[in-house]
Each structure stands twice: as structure tokens, then as C-alpha cells.
Amino acid sequence: MKHVLESVESQFEMFQILNEDGKIVNKDDMPDLSDEELKELMRRMVYTRILDQRSIALNRQGRLGFYAPTAGQEASQLGSQFALEKDDFILPGYRDVPQLIWQGLPLYQAFLFSRGHFHGNQMPEGVNALSPQIIIGAQYVQTAGVALGIKKRGRKAVAVTYTGDGGTSQGDFYEGINFAGAYKAPALFFVQNNYFAISVPVEKQTNAKTLAQKAVAAGIEGIQVDGMDVLAVYAVTKHSRDRAINGEGPTLIETLTYRYGPHTMAGDDPTRYRTEDLDNEWEKKDPLVRFRTFLEEKGIWSEEEENKVIEEAKNEIKQAIKKADEYPKQKVTDFIENMFEELPHNLQEQMEEYKEKESK
């Protein structure tokens, strides 16, 4: 039986297009992206890195609430989102706000989400997404349901979700991929394996050599990809999306990535469970450095262009936080009104009491 397991595990080798030096190692699977599309992908990655830096600073200033840093995971997050269409439905985890922003969520609303304001959870018209899920793995079950709804309506779209390596230890993870597999629902299940579920190393969570191989039990496609290689993530996502809309069922995609910062800004100290040598090893794999090298060698990216993106990001972030500051503060009555379409008798009484207090 051991040989059977080894045979299965050997099928899940990491897919890569760009190596750490920014060199193409897999020409045959190079995605068909124009120079302008490649530059736009880089622009989004640079912008998101600046957004992460400013969000951390704003959190430390007390101007943002909950925040999960994203630096290091840009290729995994944005390479996948770049392969989606407007009709696709995103069900993110709490670290996946960048995908929502590039799918159409205004930046000021992302800031309001961080502050716990209800308007930060209200997706604008035309943005097919749920607000970031805080419960680990719960979005996998939801994604199976959304994907089945998409299939029943005959739409050419997919439901896409994200969790971390820790999410694969949750029961919802298995229920979600199994249900989607049974009905061949058009779903893409991402596992962004950054190797530490807060502080627990992935090898202490599972005896599986890869997380992609967990797809086997559900009878669905499983792929492991270099999550620091934006072109590889894009190519895998596009391939999996095409399969899904053609009725071939869901795919479980494990992206091997790394978060450079803490798990969240709520007191986590990564130096307690990660070594400096490990951090240095992953810094050499930085997705921005790798992609920048590739684009510069193609002659389509420069330091001047990057600096323009950085200034653009800083200015837009400044305006967005200002708009968030000026947005009406939420009230107790807002929570009550948003909880029920028709208020039960006891809440009707409370509503009147709070309305009277708020009017004074």
C-alpha cells in the first residue's frame, strides 16, 4: 500500500513557468498575454504591495481594524484573479481582499470592511462576490453551493474560493470539494499554502506530501503550482476555469507561497515560529522581483514606470482612507435593519428605543 501512496503523490509535482531568476523554464505553457496585459499584471502587483505596506501603517496608527498582511502572496492572489471574468463569483478568505478590489470593490469599502463597518460588506452592483470569510474553511461549502447554482442556471462562469494550508484541516474543506466533485460544479478551490496556519507548520497538520493530492479523494482535478510565479498561477487558473465551464468539474489548486508579514496585525509575532534563514530563503523568491526581472529583460518595464505606479497607489490610498473617514458612522439601528427583512416583535421594540436615542 505504501507504493500506491507514493505513486499518487508523485503525480503532484510543482508547475512553474518563471524560475527565481525570472527565466522561462516552461515555454510550452507560457500564457498568451500581450505586453500590455503583462504590464497590467505587474502594475497590480506593485500597487497591491504598496497597499499592504500602507494598510499595516494605518493599522498601527489605529485607523484600520482587522488586517491580514498580503506581501509575498501577490502572485497567488492576483495571478488567479487576472484569469477570471466579470461573471465569475469570488468567495474570499480574510487575506483575499486584493482579489475583491481588482474585481471591482472600491478601496474605501475595503477599509470600511477592516473597521467592521457594514458597508464594507456590501458588494457594489455587478461585483459577484461575498465579503471575506472569517470562519476558516466555511467558504468552501459556500462555493460548492454557488457553483451548483451557476451550473443549474446554465451560466458560463465559475465560483472561486481561497483558503490557507490550515483551512485544509477543516471539515468544511472536505465537504465542499466532495459536494462540488459529485455534481461536477464549476468551482475553483485555491489553497494558498504559505506553510504556517498562523504558527503551525503544514507538516504538523497533515501527513500528505502535498495539499493538491487531497483532490484525489473527492475525484476532482488537483494541481500544485509555484505560487510565487504569477504566470504559472495565471496559466493554471485559466486552464482550470476552461475545464469547469466545459463541464469537466472543479479543480483544487495548491499555490506554494509565503507571507512575509505576520498572520494578522492582531499580535502575531512570526519570529516565534519562523527562522531568519527561512525568511531569507523566501525573500529570494519574491514574486515582484521575479516578474520585474522578466519584464525588464523583455524591455517593457522600467524603474520609472514602477515609481509612477507607487505614487498612484499612495495617492489613491490617501483618498480612499479619507473617504472611509468621512463615511457615516454605523449605528445600532443599522445592525438591526440589516439583520432581518421583517423585524420580529422584540426587535421592533428595540428599534424604536434606539431610534429615539440616536435622534437626541
Image: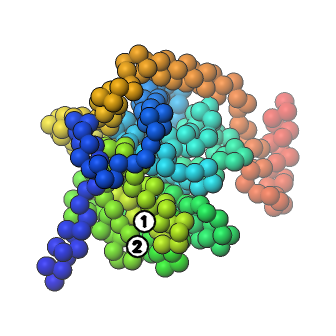
Are dots 1 and 2 in contact, CB under 8 Å? yes
Question: What is the x, y in percent for residue 90?
Answer: 55, 53
Give left or right: position of 32 versus 97: left
Numbered circles on residues, count: 2
- For the residue pair 50 and 63, the one nearer the viewer reads as 50
The Cα–Cα distance between marks 1 and 2, rounded to whole angstroms, is: 6 Å
Residue 184 appears in the figure: yes
Q: What residue type is labelled 2?
A: Ile
Q: Residue sitting at 66 percent across and 70 percent down?
A: 154
Q: Residue sitting at 37 percent across and 21 percent down?
A: 302
Image quadrant for the N terminus?
bottom left
Image quadrant for the C terminus?
top right
Question: What is the x, y in percent for residue 357?
Answer: 81, 36
- For the residue pair 139 and 31, the one nearer the viewer reads as 31
- For the residue pair 343 and 131, the one nearer the viewer reads as 131
The quarter holding residue 33 reads top left
Q: Name the residue under label 1.
A: 251
Q: Which amino acid does label 1 sit on?
A: Thr
Q: As displayed, is residue 217 above or below residue 327?
A: below
Q: Name the residue under label 2.
A: 220
Residue 193 appears in the figure: no
For marks 1 and 2, the one nearer the N-term is 2
